[in-house]
Each structure stands twice: as structure tokens, then as C-alpha cells.
Image: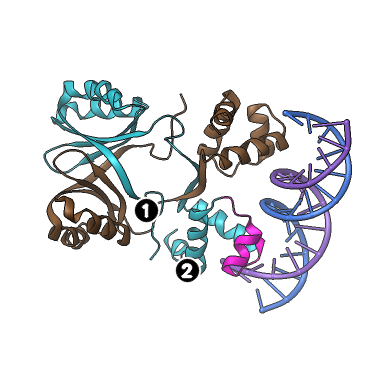
Chain colours: A brown, B cyan, C blue, D purple
Amino acid sequence: MDLQKEKLLDGIGRKILTALQENARIPFSRLGKRVGLSAPAVAERVKRLEAVGIIKGYHARIDPELMGRPVTAFIQLVTDTRYYPAVKKLAADLTEIQACHHISGEAAFMLQVRVAEVADLEAVVGRFSPYGQTRTAIVLSTTVDKREMVSLG
Amino acid sequence: MDLQKEKLLDGIGRKILTALQENARIPFSRLGKRVGLSAPAVAERVKRLEAVGIIKGYHARIDPELMGRPVTAFIQLVTDTRYYPAVKKLAADLTEIQACHHISGEAAFMLQVRVAEVADLEAVVGRFSPYGQTRTAIVLSTTVDKREMVSLG
DNA sequence: TCTGAAAGTTTATGAAT
DNA sequence: ATTCATAAACTTTCAGA
């Protein structure tokens, strides 16, 4: 399983991953030309990259602003160990929560939130404040967003 | 442009977006069956969703752990207005930086970082510390990650 | 991994709603 | 203006090598 992985991540494999991160819908025929392989060969490679779990999925990226969710914020939560399960469950259940990380440091959780208006943050914060102290930072602008790009140095 | 947008986001449009967020490589024929349209009709819809900018792209999701970048961290940077341009440029240039947000509150920037080892964080922090005071939180576990899913309530 | 053929998908066209 | 049905072009998949 690990030997396979090594073989898959040669120059061609990394080129394949780079191309599919840029455009998940590129036809195998064009992808093959780009990486120097025939279409069936590249299809086989991609299937194996999926099988070993390196490629976890293919997703359309939607503009959140056009979908009516323009506001992003981070909420940090200082809380006690006994509330961890409840916090995790709440984060999983709320559609406004984009990500929930358990982190080192004073705050136990870092939540990433997306809402329609700044005012909506109040309601989200209100759901977590019973478990501890919250600190909210509203995102004013995002200058870098490579989160779906894993760099393949 | 805005009237078009409204039409595109009817029940069928939202179903299309949901399906493409789950699986960007679903064939139009199957997508059509799922949303109750013929393959050419659904292809036409998708093309228009791309044209108005609602669909911004299609991307393969890669497992960062299997690619040798298992460590995520958040770095907050308390800094002065005059350093903003330099910080933004540095964040854009470093491959370790996944996201750079300008935020409200004491810290001006929230950086999301991905590295191979905890020790590598030191080097990244070192690049930003000339501009101000940093506060680093290492991600111990991620319990929710819906960042690429825009909820279409 | 490749070539070549079979199956399936996308795209273009013209008609129907 | 949008959708559908059909056909042509292309892509994927399955052989055999």
C-alpha cells in the first residue's frame, strides 16, 4: 500500500494531481497529452490515486457571495474539556459552521463560520457561548485562498 | 445578469449545484436524471451557472496527510497598517500559507498554514514576526470541514 | 503501458413547448 | 426562452498484446 503510493507519486503522478486540482473535469485524453501518457494509461493512474485515497473527491466550487453568504468569521472558544463533545456536535449540526478545529492554546476550538449578514453572527455565537468564552473575528477581506490546493513541491 | 441569476437558482438549479459540489465528475446524463432534465438541458444549465460566475471551478480534493503535509495551524498577526502590503505579499508567496484573511479585532491577519512537521512552523512564523506579534495555534484535530460546501438552504 | 474497438458521454442541431 | 430528441464527435473503457 505504501510502495504503491511511492510509485504513484512520481513526476507524472504529481502532474496529474496538479492538473486535476486546477480542473477536475479535464478529459483523460487531454490530461494524457499534458502528462505524456495515453488516455487509458492516465485513466488507470487516476483510478489508483483514488483507490489509495490520495484523491478524495471532485467538487464544484461555488461563489458564496453570489449564493447569499458573503460574511466569513472566525470564532474562538475558550471552554472546558467536559464540553468538548457538545461543542463538536453543535458545530457539526449548524450549517453556518464551515470548519471546526480543536486547537492548542488558550482557546480549545477555532470555528470558521459563513453567514448572510454580520448580524447573523450573533445567533451563532449565542449557540456556543453557553459552553465558554467566545472571541469573534470578522473577515474583512481574503487575500490568499489556496485551501483546496495541496502544494506538490 | 441578476434576473438570469434568479432563474438559475430555482429548485433544479440548486439541485444541480448540490450534486456538482458532491461530485464534480458526474455525467450530464446521470445529473439530468437526478434533477429531472435531459442531458443537453442540464449541460446548458451548467454552462450558464459557469457563465454568471456561480460555479467558479471544479477541483480534485487531495489528502494533505498522504501528500506529506499533515500539520495545520493558525497564525494570528498583530501588526501595523504600514506592513499590510508586505504581509499580504509574503502570504501569497509562501506555499505553506493556505489562506490569508484580513480580520477585525486586535490581530489584523489570520493565516492558515500547512506544513510537514510542527518544527516547520517555526520557520513560517519567523517570516512574519518581523512585522509584528504572532500567536500560533496548532490544529490537533478537525471535527468539521465543510469549507468547500456552500449550503444551499 | 500501448493500440484499437465497443460502449458511453458530450455537444450541436432542429423541432416542440 | 427553455427543453427535448436525435445524430455526430468525442471520451472512456475494455480487450489483447
Identify the mark at residue A64; answer none if there is no mark: 1
Q: Does the magenta stretch include residue A141?
A: no
Magenta-drawn stretch contains B38:
yes
Give the image quarter of residue B65. Answer: top left
Query: Residue A139 versus residue B145: which sits nearer the camera?
Result: B145
Disc 2 crowd rating (10 Å Cα; few below 14, some 14-19, many 20+) is few
Q: Is mark 2 on a helix, strand or loop?
A: loop
Q: Using the image, determine if residue B120 lies above or below residue B66.
A: above
For mark 1, name the chain. Answer: A
The residue pinned by badge 2 equals: B10
* As drawn, A67 above or below B104: below
Q: Quadrant of residue A149?
A: top left
Along the viewing direction, whichever of A150 and B82 lies nearer the viewer: A150
Residue A134 appears left or right of B99: left
The majority secondary structure of the magenta stretch comes to helix
- The quarter of the rendered structure image containing the N terminus of chain A is top right
The residue drawn where x is 57% and y is 54% is: B47
- Residue A116 visible in the current orientation: no
Chain for disc number 2: B
The residue stretch that appears in magenta: B25-39
Q: State the image coordinates of residue B15 (x, y, percent, origin top left).
A: 50, 64
| A33, A63: nearer the viewer | A33
**x, y (%) of residue B68?**
43, 29
Residue B23, horizontal then vertical, whole percent = 53, 53
Q: Distance between the residues labelled 2 and 1?
A: 16 Å
